[in-house]
Amino acid sequence: MSIELGAGAWSYFGDPRAISHDGHAFTGWISTTGNVWVAHIRPDGRFTKRVIYKGLGVDDHNNPSLVFRPDGRIAAFFSPHSGRVLPPPSLRPSRMRYRISKRPFSIDGFERVRLVKTNVRGGLGYTYPNPIQQRGKLWLFWRGGGWNPTFSYTRNGRDWVPARELLRSREDERPYSKYVGDGKTNIHGVFTEGHANHFDNSLYYLRYENMGFFGANGRRLGSLRNVPLPISELERIYRFTKAGGSAWPHDIALTSRGRPRIVYTRRVGDRDTFFYAYNNGERWISRKIVEAGPGFPSFTSGGATLDHEDPRIVYLSRRTGDFHEVEAWFTPDDGRSWRTRRLTHEPRHYCIRPVTPRGLRNQNLVLFSRGDRSTVGFTDFRTRIHALPGEAPPV
């Protein structure tokens, strides 16, 4: 049986939404009243929670993204959804805020709110924080002032280097990105040119290491000195076709050998299909997992994530009847075959956007958003965050 953490939501693209240490999980969400919450879930299922910021706005893009600092303290990043007409006037100018916990692996108290006081030109603010701790550097990626993937980093947790665009798409398009770091020197990303509803997206891959950008097989694609790179010049995972559909990245994780695994959807009309992608040493291969089924006006796909401790496991949400259910899918052979198990059983509610805490080992915990047809859209939602402990995937 799932545990209800609180009323709220999260988007697909602000990550990590949940992290873990020594069996303890930490997560966060934006509430139905626009407040930023974080929660600590203990191994026995008990949890505590607290508000760390009030009045960020009712928008499911505004969820906090969490990361552990080297000393174990938690950094939570959050910003209002910013674009052509957002955020609302009361939240302008757009700001990227963050708070750091006072104690390691604890949400009992947080330091004052700080700002990432750098962005690129464009006036479109900050959206989708993605913090990645790499040894002594805390990197932050977001969708920046020009609607493109943007980044900065800090060494001391306070002072940020001037922001730069990482990639650039066509004019007036907004790329979508997912990132993962190895905690050392490599950061991997997967990208599209634009929104899957409005652009014929292909899917692209990039790896950063020691000032350089590379493909999966080591081909050099550019340098940190010459960013932004054109997205179309990256290594292509999937090339758009009308029959194949428009790509939408959902997650990227690394195997124990540091090889990327990717889960994404292809959209044809109003239907999505989940795919699993990897590089075999020569080329990228995508294999179908399952069709996502029809969505609702407030979302097309129920979403998917990889188990970052074992990326042979995919957690996804698909419509199996009147609503969406969360399922675990396991592949022993890089997507050639699959075993599956349904994790939720909600005949009157949908269960969407599942995630598992990064770093959680030797036990299972799946988090998801639960709602019904009263949710109209990303600024009008009636959803609640749930935690589902102990449901083992079909390994």
Image (spheres, helix red, strand yellow):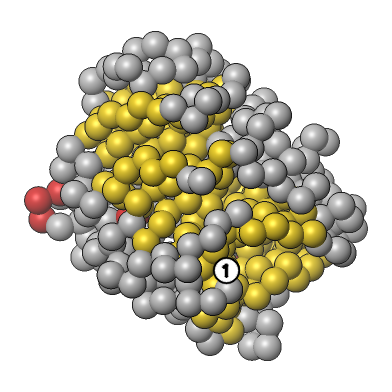
Measured as percent of width and height from the top left, residue 348 is found at 42, 68
Foreground of the two, 341 or 303: 341
Q: Residue at x 66, y 68 (%)?
A: 274
Foreground of the two, 351 or 250: 351
Q: Residue at x 74, y 41 (%)?
A: 310
Residue 381 falls left or right of residue 103: left
Measured as percent of width and height from the top left, residue 266 is found at 62, 74
Residue 154 in view: no
Residue 219 falls left or right of residue 354: right
Badge 1 element: strand
Residue 155 falls left or right of residue 360: left
Compared with residue 201, is residue 24 higher up or lower down, i.e. above or below? above
The image shows a total of numbered marks equal to 1
Q: Residues within 10 Å of mark 1 (few under 14, many from 20)?
A: many
Compared with residue 198, is residue 126 higher up or lower down, i.e. above or below? above
Q: Residue at x 50, y 12 (%)?
A: 71
- Three-letter code, disc 1: Arg
Residue 275 in view: yes
Foreground of the two, 68 or 9: 9
Measured as percent of width and height from the top left, residue 150 is found at 45, 47
Compared with residue 13, is residue 113 higher up or lower down, i.e. above or below? above
Residue indicated by mark 1: 318
Q: Residue at x 49, y 37 (%)?
A: 18
Based on the displayed image, in which of its 4 quarters is residue 135 positioned? top right
